[in-house]
Image (tube, helix red, strand yellow):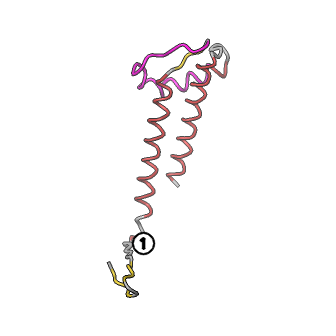
Amino acid sequence: MFAAWIGIALAVIEVIIGFRLGFLLAGANPSNGFVDFIYDISDPLTDPFQGIFTNRSVDGGIFEPASLIAMLVYLVSGALLIALILAMTRGLAPHGDRVVSSRTRHREGVAHED
């Protein structure tokens, strides 16, 4: 369940930063309420990545590499965190019992335990 909440939070973060990147590329009016709202909530998410690469002008808009880097870093971090949580929770059996699994290998019609 915790992994699902992290997945939802990750999706929200990705969408917010995606809107920021799209608005910057399109040269959206920053005095518009919605655009300003997106910039305000996405600033803290992209600030750690500002200055890695310089922004570039693109047909009246701005390409901000920090947004793209932030999206990639949050995606990878979130995916790794979800994978870690799932690995930890799937390895536990009810009531704290250990899960033991074995594989059998068939060789010349005879089953051998590994």
Magenta region? 36-59
Across the whole image, how many numbered discs are drawn on residues? 1
Please state, as top left, top right, bottom left or bottom right, where the C terminus lies in the image. bottom left
Q: Which corner quadrant of the image does residue 58 belong to?
A: top right
Q: Secondary structure at mark 1?
A: helix
Q: Is residue 7 left or right of residue 111?
A: right
Whole-percent x, y for residue 76 in the image: 44, 41
Q: Dot 1, crowdedness within 10 Å: few (<14), some or many (≥20)?
A: few
Among all residues in the image, which is located at the extreme front?
108
Residue 38 among those drawn in magenta: yes
Q: Amino acid at mark 1?
A: His
In the rendered view, would you say 74 is above or below 53? below
Looking at the image, which residue is at 63% across and 19% down?
Answer: 26
Residue 48 among those drawn in magenta: yes
Looking at the image, which residue is at 46% across and 24% down?
Answer: 66
Looking at the image, which residue is at 65% across and 13% down?
Answer: 31
In the rendered view, would you say 56 is above or below 9? above
Whole-percent x, y for residue 50 in the image: 43, 21
In-front residue for pair 50/32: 50
Whole-percent x, y for residue 96 in the image: 39, 70
In-front residue for pair 3/28: 28
Q: Which corner quadrant of the image does residue 21 belong to?
A: top right
In the rendered view, would you say 11 is above or below 32? below
Disc 1 target residue: 95
